[in-house]
Image (cartoon, rainbow, N blue to C red):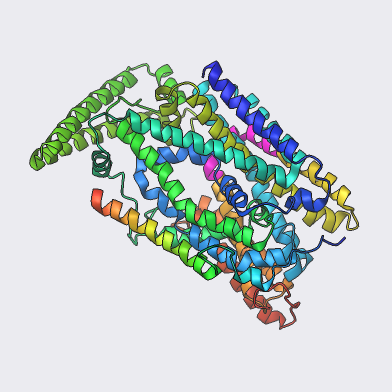
Amino acid sequence: MSALDFVVLIGSMLGIAIYGIWRTRGRRSLNAYLHGDGRTPWFAIGLSVMATQASAITFLSTPGQGYLGGLGFVQIYFGVPIALIIIAIFFLPIFRRLNVYTAYEFLGRRFDGKTRLLGAALFLVQRGLGAGLTIYAPAIVLTTVFGWPLDLTIICSGLLVIIYTVAGGSDAVTVTQKYQIGIIFAGMVTAFCLLVAKLPAGLTFTDTLALAGGFQKLNAVNFSTNIHERYTFWSGLLGGTFLMLSYFGTDQSQVQRYISGSSLREGRLGLMFNAVCKIPMQFSILLLGVLIFVFYQFEQPPLLFNPASHQYLALHDDSGQLQALESGFQQTHNQARRQIENWLDARHNGDETGARTAFAAAAAAQQQGEAIRAQAEKTLSAANSGTTANDADYVFITFILHQLPHGVIGLLVAAFFAAALSSKSAELNALGSSTTIDFYRHLVKRDATDAACVAASKWFTAFWGLVAIGFALYAHLVENLIQAVNILGSIFYGVMLGLFVVAFFIRRVGGTAVFWGALAAQMLVFFLYYIYFNPRFFHPPISYLWYPLVGCAACVLLSLILQAALGATNKSAPASPVS
Amino acid sequence: MKHPAATEPSARESEETSLPIFRSWKSVYLLVLGSFVFWVTLLIALTEFFS
C-alpha cells in the first residue's frame, strides 16, 4: 500500500469515528443513549440493519465464493424477505408498543423474570464469545496480505470502535454506519467498474455471461431436493427463513437497530428496505467474483491466492514439487486461454461447431488447472502448516492489490475496515445494553437512575469491547475459527427463537413451562453437539446446521407438554399479538 | 424506574404507510414479495439461459 492508500484508509476511519462522537455529544438520558434521539428515519434504519449484518468477511469472502462456486450461494438469502415481513408484522409492533430497550425485556413482560434472564444470557454467551471474530477475521486476511502486525491491527481497530460506541451509544452506531456503508458501496462499485473496464476489449457483455455460464458459474438456482447439497432453492427458502428469523428477530444487535426508529412506520420501512435490497446486493457481490473468474481466464492467476500458503509451500519444497505444480498450472492456463480466444473468434464468426469444440477444450484445460490447484492445497494440508483460512478469502484482496490503482486500494481496504467496525459497534452496543437493562437494572440495582444506567452501559460496552479484543488476540488457538463460531451460533439460536415463537404465537404457555422447556431443549442441542464430535455413539451424526431447527422445535414442543402437565395456570399475556 | 413515554403506535400508523402509491402495509408486503419473485425469476432465467 502506498502513502495515498494509508491517507484514504486512516482518514476515512478516523474521520467517521470523530464525526460520530461529535454528532452524538451530550446524549445523557438512558432513552437517548440506548434508543437514539427518536428521529432516526427509515433510510438510516435500513442502512444500519444492513451494515450490522454485513461484516468485513462478507465483502472479502463473498467474491471468492462467486469465483470458486458461482452464484449458487445467493440462495441462502431467499429467506430474508419472508423473515423480515414476519418481523415487521408481528415482532416490531409488540417491541414498540412495550417500548422495550432489549428484546429480552419483552420475554420478561410476556412470561417472567427468569425467562427474560435466560433469553438475555443465551444472547450474551453466544454474541459475547463470537464477538472477537468480527475483528479477527478481516485482520488475519489483511495482515497476511499486507504484512502488518496482526496484534496491533486488532488492538487499533478494536479500540477505535470501543471509543466511539461508548461515547455516543446507539446513535453513534447509526450515524457512523451511514457513512461506513457509503464507503463500502463506493469501494465495491469502483472495484466493479474497474474490473469491467479491465476485461478484454473484444469481450462483449453476452460473451462474458456465456463464458461464465459455460464454466457453470451462473447456476444461481438449484431445485434439487437432495438434502446433502448445501445450497438449494428449498434449503434457502425454508432453512434460510428460519435462520434469518432467528437472527433478525431475536438477536439484540439487530433488534436495537430497528426499534430505534422514530415510529413504527420508520422501523417497518427500514426492514422492508432490507427485504428488497438484500438479494440484489448479495447477487452483485457474487457477480463481482464471477467477473474476477472471467478476468483470470485472460490473465495468469496465482496457484494459491493466500500468500502465506504459497510462502509455506515454497519454504518446505525440498523436492521441487511446488515448481512442477506452478509450471503445470501455468501451462494449462495458457492452453485454456488459447482455446477461449478460439471460442470467441468462432462465436463472433457464427461458427457454432467450432465454438463448441474450442469451449470443450478450454473446459478440459481449466479442469486440469483446478486439479493442479487441488493438489497444491492437498500438499499444504498434508504439511500441516496451520493455515486455516480458506483460499477463497484471498481471491478479491489479491485482485485488488495486483490490478487496481493506488488510492482505490486504500478505499477498498477502508471499505473492509468500515464493514468490520460497523457490525462490531452494533454488537458492542447490544451487549452493553442487554447487560445493563437485563442484568444490572433488573438484578443488581432496581432503583438505578438514568444517569447510573448510562454510566453502567458505557462500562459494560467497554468491557465487551475488551473481551472481543482479547478473544481476537487468542483466536488463532482455535483450529477452525469460522466453523467454531458457526457452531456456537447454531447451538443457541434455535432455543432463542423457540422462546420468541412461544411468546408471540402460543398464548396458553406460561413462564415456568417455557423456561424449563427451553432449558431442556438447550440440553438436547448440547447433547447433539456432543455426539457430533463423538460419532461412535450415533452414526451418521446430525450436522450442526440443523441445530437451530431442532432447538426451536424442541423448545416449542416441550413448553406445550410442560404447560399441559402444569395446567392452565399461566400468567396473562398482555404483549401477545393476539391480545 | 419507569420507561419514558412509550411511543404507542396508533391504529392509523399500524394501517397506513404515508407512502404515495403503497398506502397500506399489505400493499408494501406484496411489493416486497413481488420483488422477491422478480429476482428469483431473473436468477432462474440466468441459470437456464447461460448454463
The x and y percentages for residue A177 are 62, 42
Quadrant location of the C terminus of chain A in the rendered image: bottom right
Q: Is residue B24 left or right of residue A572?
A: left
Above or below — where is A194 with respect to A214? Answer: above
Residue A475: quarter of image: top right
Q: Which residues are the magenta region?
A: A466-484
Which residue lies at the image location 32% right of the left edge and 17% below the top edge? A320
The x and y percentages for residue A481 are 55, 39
Magenta: predominant secondary structure element? helix
In the rendered image, the residue lying farthest to the bottom is A568
The x and y percentages for residue A162 are 72, 36
Q: Is residue A298 left or right of residue A283?
A: left
Which residue lies at the image location 53% right of the left edge and 55% below the top edge? A273
User: Is residue B51 visible in the rendered structure shown here?
Assistant: no
Please name whichever residue, A345 or A498, is drawn nearer the observer in this view of the structure.
Answer: A345
Which residue lies at the image location 27% right of the left edge and 39% below the top edge? A205
- Inspect the magenta stretch and tell me whether residue A302 lies in it: no
The x and y percentages for residue A109 are 76, 68
User: Is residue B4 visible in the rendered structure shown here?
Assistant: yes
